[in-house]
Image (cartoon, grey):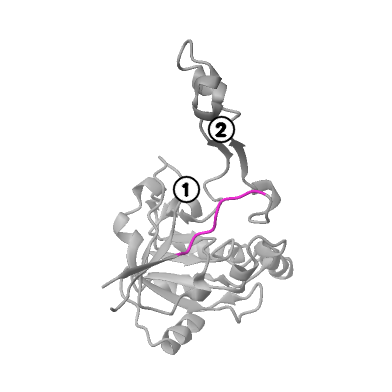
Amino acid sequence: MPRRIVDLSVALEVGIASDPPPMFPQIDYLDHQSTAEQVASYFPGLKTEDLPGGEGWAVEQLRITTHNGTHLDAPYHFHSTMNNGERAITIDEVPLDWCFQRGVKLDFRHFADGYVVTASDVEAELARINHQLQPLDIVLVNTAAGARYGHADYVSTGCGMGREATLYLLERGVRVTGTDAWSWDAPFVHTAQEFQKTHDASLIWEGHRAGMEIGYCHIEKLANLETLPATGYEVSCFPYKIKGASAGFTRAVAIFQDEE
């Protein structure tokens, strides 16, 4: 059967609202002209005009965090421990088997910005799409934030997954989840408002912190989730291997095996 691949990743770029301002990525683009002397320096006696067209190579220098662009968070990002006291694994220790599995999409675009998704919400959506979770299913959450990527309101848009909703998935064997929002949790601006009312610190990052009880990973800043059906494909999200890191970049894709 022919294979069809759908890109679920955003491009790493500057000049757009992809993160809060202190976390914006920076990219210096060195073109063929600006690097010609650099190339020539490796070969004594070589003049830049001896190079084809007088050109060197194109190179980019990045000043970024591991959480810029589409990335996979390791349990270590959420807390120093997971599984109720074990040392949390870093991105280079994440089992690769977690990162290439059957995909399931939950469509939560109708929820208001800042809404905290509950276990009953997840259960209702699974019933709507007629899907029973299996261990290692990769669950993708389509929020209203996906359509706002790059816009000024991106980081404040969309719903977030609460602790009980996250544990509902993890207790059924899910180990990788994903969202098209900036965070797996509700946008901070909305959580901050709730915290001011309640002074309950357990509300802060509650979906992430579920990893303290059951270790898991999630993908953030996914793209094109609105083009996916609920099921019928595999997701690949292997992370870049960075020693001891809290996250790794991923070119997440959905893979369909279409019929002839």
| Residue 222 visible, this angle | yes
Quick check: is 186 in the magenta stretch? no
Magenta segment range?
Answer: 7-14
Point out the image quarter for the C terminus: bottom left
At mark 1, the secondary structure is loop
Amino acid at dot 1: Ser
Amino acid at dot 2: His
User: Where residue 32 is drawn, which disc sits there?
Assistant: 2
**Which residue is most to the top?**
45
Q: State how far apart marks 1 and 2 are (Cα).
A: 34 Å
User: Residue shown at 26%/73% (left/top)?
Assistant: 1
Quick check: is 10 in the magenta stretch? yes
User: Residue shown at 49%/60% (left/top)?
Assistant: 9
User: Residue shown at 66%/66% (left/top)?
Assistant: 191
User: Where residue 246 is drawn, which disc sits there?
Assistant: 1
Is the stretch drawn in magenta largely helix, strand or loop?
A: loop
**Viewer-nearest residue: 227 or 137:** 227
Q: Mark 1 or 2 closer to N-term?
A: 2
- Crowding at dot 2, Cα within 10 Å, few <14 / some 14-19 / many 20+, comes out as some
